[in-house]
Amino acid sequence: MTGDGLGVEVREESGVLVVRFRGRLDWTTYLCVQDVLLDCATKELVGVVVELDDLVAESPALLVVFDVVWLSAARWPGISMSLVVGDHRLRSTLESRGLPRHIPMHATTPAAIGAVVRLEHEDRVDTALPTCRCLPHVAERITERACERWGVQSMLDVAPQVAVELVSHVEEDSHLALLLRMRDDKLSVAVRTTARLDLKQWHVMRHNVASIAVCDFSMGETPAGGGRHIIWASFDVPQDSRRPPPRLPEPAVFTHQG
């Protein structure tokens, strides 16, 4: 229970974070709800399910908080979010007002968890970076090794340079982390930081990343709660970039004894 009377319970079920809110959603608890959900989304399990039956919204307009988080999480890291509304009256109220606008609703938590789409393949790196002059070099080497380990040789001339570009704009930050994600056919290079970039910095950084990239990419910023932000660039890995073969179980060996 938070100091403002809002109760929050978070648990994990089948790789999904289930968040249960109790109490009132009003203008004093709005940011708390948003921060909790953003923090859960950027923990990057396979999805986030929010149980709503014990949360009372002071105004239906406040339910836009779920759309805000859903849009951020859908862009990066691509984590799904859904709502559980078992109360028929609450569900009717939501549907009649068209809020939330984007998020799937389910009647039960098992149904919501069962509907989460599981990625076929995912690799990740999440590591704190040192606060020294060697910071860009460290980020570059970590990214190179990840690309080699994941078998995306075609990205070796792109991803490490992008990592250097991202950390170079926030290298004064004392709590900087490098995030690398390989999800199906998309490779993401990101930094988690408390620093904020102005429009000029964003323009320069995007221009530099565009000059490095040799494939389709997108860039953005995702709030991560607690004053942190994730600055990310996501790339489509070319089809001719071969991934390592999946690890298959060893075939059973049968012997016959007389």
Image: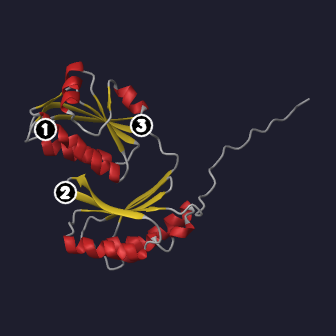
Question: Label 3 crowding class (10 Å Cα cut-off): few <14, some 14-19, many 20+?
Answer: some
Q: Which residue is mark 1?
A: 61
- Amino acid at the residue labelled 1: Ala
Q: Which mark is residue 116?
A: 3
Of the two numbered discs 1 and 3 on the same chain, state the one appearing first in sequence.
1
Of the two numbered discs 2 and 3 on the same chain, state the one appearing first in sequence.
3
- Amino acid at the residue labelled 2: Gly
- Observer-nearest of 28 and 177: 28
Image quadrant of residue 64?
A: top left
Q: How many marks?
A: 3
Give the residue furthest to the bottom.
Answer: 133
Give the image location of residue 256, x and y in percent.
Answer: 87, 32
| Picture colour scheme | secondary structure
Q: Give the residue drawn at x 30%, y 45%.
A: 40
Give the image location of residue 197, x and y in percent.
Answer: 21, 69
Q: Can residue 195 be spotted in the picture?
A: yes
Q: Which residue is mark 2?
A: 227
